[in-house]
Amino acid sequence: SVSFTVSAANEKISDNGVIYTMFDGYAAVTGREANTVNVVIKPEINGVPVTTVFSTAFNSDKLIKSVEIPDSVTVINDRSFYKCTALKSVKLPETLTAIGGKVFTGCTALEEISIPDSVSSLGKEVFSDCTNLKSVNIPQSLTEIPRLAFRNCTSVESISFPEGVTNISEMAFESCEALSEINFPDSLKSIGQNAFCHCEMLKEVNLPEGIECMESGVFQATGIESIVLPSSLTEIGDF
């Protein structure tokens, strides 16, 4: 005879239209029911905390309109909301520490998002191709803007970096066609290749004294005609 032991681990639970998967000591959001387009995630299920949103949870979901993520969640995994083209409202918790790569890539209905200051890590391409994103804040705890982070966010007009940001990676704001104002922090040390390439509305920038490295093509194909280079620069690529 064959006997099976059924474990509570990896059990799937649907609650208020949201699907959770149970693990040892925590639960993860792994999807939604067909008729639930406004997703409200609970902080705990069956007495265990909901701490993460899985990569496959809403990837390429064309119908989801809004999501509220509770204070129990600390991590949103790669591609969790990738190409959710109807997603217009996102509420992120103050407990969030990491947003993975391509999490909101191609969320073309998203107009604004507030990233909590608790977030110290953003993945590459996290908001790329969010063509209607008009306002975005950079959290205080972030030191690096990742590669392609806001590429082709064609509606963003201004960006302010908080003190603490030391590195803006390559192509981070490439093709942000409406971007006309940038406030760099004094903490900035390096700007990667093509970081602001094809930001055609950008006419002037003030680089902080203290920046050390500016790779090639940083302001290529912008409206900038002249730029003052700080004496602290030790490495400059081709313009």
Image (cartoon, rainbow, N blue to C red):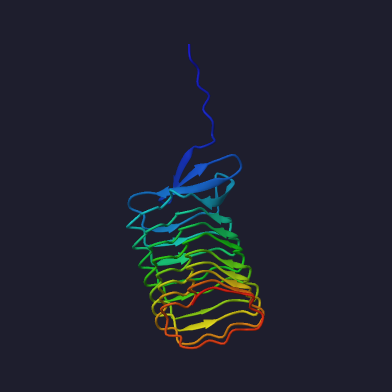
- Of the pair 214 and 135, the residue shown nearer to us: 214
Residue 22 is situated, as x and y percent measured from the top left of the image, at 53, 41
Q: Position of residue 209 (x, y in %)?
A: 65, 83
Give the percent coordinates (x, y) of residue 90: 45, 65
Nearest the viewer among 171 and 88 is 171
Residue at 55% x, 72% y: name it: 138
Q: Which residue is drawn at 60% across and 61% down?
A: 95
115 relative to 65 in the view: left or right: right
Q: In which quarter of the image is residue 165?
A: bottom right
Count the marks. 0
Question: Is 234 on the left or on the right of 137, as rendered?
Answer: right
Which residue is at the far front? Answer: 238
Q: Residue 185: which quarter of the image?
A: bottom right
- Position of residue 92 measured from the top left corner of the image (x, y, whole percent): 52, 64
Looking at the picture, does residue 73 appear above or below residue 4?
below
Residue at the extreme top of the image, as rendered: 1
| Residue 217 against residue 75 in the figure, above or below | below
Placement of 225 over or under 212, stated as above or below: below
Horizontal side of residue 212 vs 168, given as left or right: right
**Is 1 placed above or below 117 here?**
above
Q: Residue drawn 59% across and 67% down?
A: 144
Q: Residue at x 41, y 78 (%)?
A: 221
